[in-house]
Amino acid sequence: MDYNLLNGGLILKVGEGLVVSDIKSSTTIFNSRVNGMFWFMNFDGNSIFYSDQKRDNSLNRIDLREQREILLLDKPCYGVVLYKDFLYYINENDRKLYRCMINGRNEARIIDEQVEGFILEQGCIFYSTPQGIRSCSETGSQRETISDIPASKLVLIGERLVFSHKGRQHVLTIMDLNTGNANIVQAVAAASINTDGTYLYCANRLNGKSIYRIDPEHYSSIRICSESADYLHIIEKELYFYANSQWCRMSLMGGQAEKIMR
């Protein structure tokens, strides 16, 4: 899964350029023109799929070949994820998980419980509910309870499920899925979290939302940026984040951040 989607899916690389949604102005810059306010942008090589805040969070598609916008579902869709030939999303009216085909047809409810967030990896959905963490197949079958911990911001890295523990002031928690053992990362609470597949990157609530890099194997952390950040995105070994009402980027190793829009 592209964990930029966990953080709003607000920046998307298309070809040699970026599609950028600016939170301050509530607009999305695409091909030098201003469109709606795109959230949860997914790209399949031909089209961009997204939820448009300026259209009541409806599910839409931009066909890049024909340069036209298409309404797929006229209902509020949150956390949109493209997987195979389907789009998965939380309906903001009932907070349940659905999917439809990429043309907007054959909508089906996947999860009957209220879902606060979900991720989809290799045909398995991990999702958080007020009662804890669950899993199921991509069709909603084979449901299992993973933990009764109230969680948010789920990330899977190898055999470890990482999340923000809502019952313990959002402390960063790493669970071994093989043993069920959960360990916390001291002095780190996740406001925003992403991964490059090796390390975790977290905007730390406990230190002014400055950015930390965490080793999930040894539970160690180091601060790599002092900016107060949110909406962490990773694109081509660079970390993009929103700070001081503007988008910035920096190396995953840390260092000086630069603005990407003036």
Image: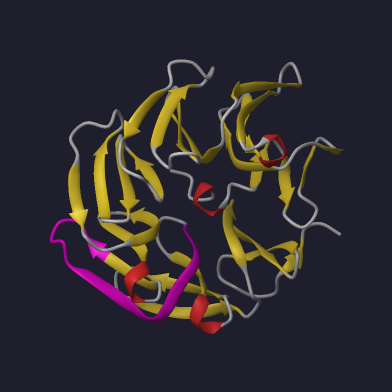
- Characterize the magenta stretch by its predominant secondary structure: strand
Q: Quadrant of residue 185?
A: bottom left
Q: Where in the figure is residue 210, as x and y percent of width and height?
A: 58, 77
Q: Where in the figure is residue 24, as x and y percent of width and height?
A: 77, 58
Residue 86 or residue 58, whichever sits in front: 58
Q: Where in the figure is residue 131, as x and y percent of width and height?
A: 26, 56
Direction left: furthest residue: 179
Can residue 237 be seen from the camera position used here?
A: no
Q: Quadrant of residue 107?
A: top left
Which image quadrant: the C terminus?
A: bottom right
Residue drawn where x is 49% and y is 51% of the image: 6
Residue drawn where x is 50% and y is 75% of the image: 212
Q: Is residue 251 left or right of residue 179?
A: right
Relative to 110, residue 101 above or below: above
Q: Quadrant of residue 86?
A: top left
| 2 magenta-colored | no
Q: Is residue 126 left or right of residue 226?
A: left
Direction front: furthest residue: 93
Q: Which residues are magenta?
A: 175-195
Q: Is residue 194 left or right of residue 237?
A: left
Q: Where in the figure is residue 236, as x and y percent of width and height?
A: 59, 51
Relative to 232, residue 120 above or below: above
Residue drawn where x is 70% and y is 70% of the image: 257
Which image quadrant: the N terminus?
A: top left
Relative to 157, residue 229 above or below: below
Q: Is residue 4 left or right of residue 39?
A: left
Residue 68 or residue 14, whichever sits in front: 68
| 183 magenta-colored | yes
Can residue 5 be seen from the camera position used here?
A: yes
